[in-house]
Each structure stands twice: as structure tokens, then as C-alpha cells.
Amino acid sequence: SLFPSPSLPLPPTVPPPSAPPQQPPSCPPPCSLPTPPSPGIPAHTIDHARASRGVAQCDAALKNPDGVFHQMWAPDGWRRRRWRAEACWGDWDGDAYWEAAIAGTVCDSNWYEGAIKRPDYEAPAPAVFGFDGAIDQYCAKACKDRGFADCNPDDSPHTCVKANMNMLYLVGEDVRNTGHGYNLCRNLEWQICAATSSLPGQQSSGLVFAPPPRELNL
């Protein structure tokens, strides 16, 4: 028979399938949906007026011929340069000096010139940034941690080398045949070399700060 007999039980009723759960609208790249801030962390706001004032102050300082940004490049490291007086880059054109410094043309040098010979590091040697006294103490501790007994903080060139650290320590009045000793030109060159892991023996060991910037009182 084409119809079920009234005496037979009817098959159970099957409910219709549920609708798929609603999904949030897709966000095609580039996604423009805002990312909610992390719980407990206030959203960062930018004080544009203050930022503009900071830019203006820096611009004015750079343009001031009597300002520190012009005085700091004297050939003698502890003197102030007068406007249009000789700079520490010597006979170089200023732009040429900066290009050479950024290119790292002097990185493969003895940055302990006048104190000790160029060291041969046993392992990748990080570059130490910081104040002189803090660097001395940092290297002395690292030297002792490596098992050396003679780790004199007053002899930082030897102590930092024993600690397997790179530091800047230039002595004398004719560094790298420039006719001058330590100055901000040599300091900047060393910092660029350190930041690019180009100091002798540094390889990819990076930088160390003594003390860490978060501990400085500004």
C-alpha cells in the first residue's frame, strides 16, 4: 500500500536542521576592524601639541649656531667648537664624514688604541654602553664571572677584554693618524659600528647597557 496502515506507529518526526551560528563579519585585508585594548592597559594617546613643540625645539636647537649640537664636534674631545671653526672630521666634507661613518668604513679598527693592542676575543664580544664608572664595574663583575682573579675596574681595557666585552677606550693625541685624540667623531663611529654588530669580535652578540636605560634618572 502507498499509505501506512493506521495500526502501525508513525515514524518519529525529525526536527529541521539548526541554522549555522552567526559569524562576525569578515574583514578583508587590510583589516579595518579596531583591535580592543588589552584588559587593564589603558589605550595610549598622543599629545600632538606636545609632540609638535618637541619637534620645534629640536629644529631650533639644530639651527642654533651657538647650541650644543654645533659645539660638540670640536677636534679636541673636551673642548667646545666655535661656530664655523674646525670640526672633528678634519679635512673631510661634513656630508662625506657622515656617509663614511654610517657605512662603517672604520669599524675594523683597534678601539683601544693607545692603551692596549687590538684584542683577539675568544667568543662573540658584546659592546658595552654606559658611563665610565658603570662600565668599569660591569666589566669587573663579568671578568670574575668568567673565572679570572685579576679583574681590576681601574684597568678597564684589560678587564673588559677578559670579560669578553667591547668598549671604547682611545688614548693619545693622534688617534688613527687624525692629529687628535678622542672626540665625538670617534665616539659616534664606535656607536654606529656597535649598533650594526661590526666591531672586531662582536659578531651578532649585540649590546649591553651599564646600567640599563630603565635605571637612569633623567
Image (tube, rainbow, N blue to C red):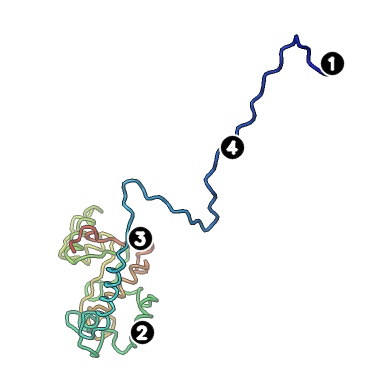
* Helix, strand or loop status at disc 1: loop
Give amino acid for label 3: Ser
Residue identified by numbered label 1: 1
Q: Which mark is residue 95?
A: 2
Give amino acid for label 1: Ser
Quarter containing the N terminus:
top right
Give the Cα separation between the discs numbered 3 and 4.
54 Å
- First along the sequence among labels 3 and 4: 4
| Residue 68 sits in quarter | bottom left
Q: Is residue 3 left or right of residue 138?
A: right
| Residue 211 sits in quarter | bottom left
Give amino acid for label 2: Asp
Residue furthest to the left in view is: 154
Could you classify mark 4 by the number of other residues whose Cα lies within 10 Å: few (under 14), some (14-19), or many (20 or more)?
Answer: few
Could you classify mark 3 by the number of other residues whose Cα lies within 10 Å: few (under 14), some (14-19), or many (20 or more)?
Answer: some
Residue furthest to the front in view is: 6
Of badges 1 and 3, nearer the viewer stands 1
Residue identified by numbered label 3: 205
Give the Cα separation between the discs numbered 3 and 2.
30 Å
Residue identified by numbered label 4: 20
- First along the sequence among labels 4 and 1: 1
Give the Cα separation between the discs numbered 2 and 4.
66 Å
